[in-house]
Amino acid sequence: MLLLCFGCSQNKKLTEEQKFEKSNKVGPFFNFDKIYHYSIDIADSDLPGGAEYPEDPNESYEIKKWHIIQGHDPKKLDTLIEVKLLENGFLVNEIPKAKLKPLNELFSTRYVKYRYESECIPVYRDILIFKKNGKIVGIAKLCFACDQHVIRGSKTYADFFGTREDFTKLRKLLGKKPRD
């Protein structure tokens, strides 16, 4: 009787998600100990209007407000952003410590098979400022009307953030009304 032993080798084909996790830096977007939620209640009819305004150091109040609410500013972490938000009518609340862990999990890199892209013009009425030891480490501008966002300061890949599920969780955590 002849026994042949063949080396067992399992097919180790990686899934798309496993490849993503191996090839990208994953984890939380920000290392923070506090989050401040800035929000403004402004009707669409009261928004600063028109096409994109040019960058101008002498720009008017309305243009500055437009850059905050409808533009992609700030382009980088700006230590004056909090002052600008308050000057433009935003209200601020510190996020309770009990909500920091779920927000940290939400603002983390993870694989998303299908991404949703909205075609509406975002109005960023909600802005989260992430801080560590009093220093701004990240900013997330959020449009709950069309589930769009701008993230600045992320330590990891943030492009897969912003699914409908993400925004549903954010609405709940921030006490926002459910989407129609």
Image (tube, helix red, strand yellow):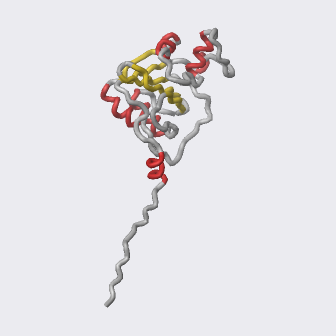
Of 63 and 22, nearer the camera is: 22
Q: Is residue 134 left or right of residue 141?
A: left
Of 41 and 91, nearer the camera is: 91
Image height of 104 relative to 49, above or below: below
Q: Is residue 86 left or right of residue 57?
A: left
Q: Is residue 87 left or right of residue 106?
A: right
Q: Is residue 144 visible?
A: no
Image height of 94 relative to 100, above or below: above
Q: Is residue 38 left or right of residue 54?
A: left
On the image, the x and y values in percent for residue 82 come to 47, 15
Task: Indicate the quadrant where residue 65 lies.
Answer: top right
Of 44 and 78, nearer the camera is: 78
Residue reaching furthest bottom?
Answer: 1
User: At 44% from the left edge and 27% from the top edge, which residue is drawn?
Assistant: 176
Task: Indicate the quadrant where residue 118 lies.
Answer: top right
On the image, the x and y values in percent for residue 94 come to 37, 20
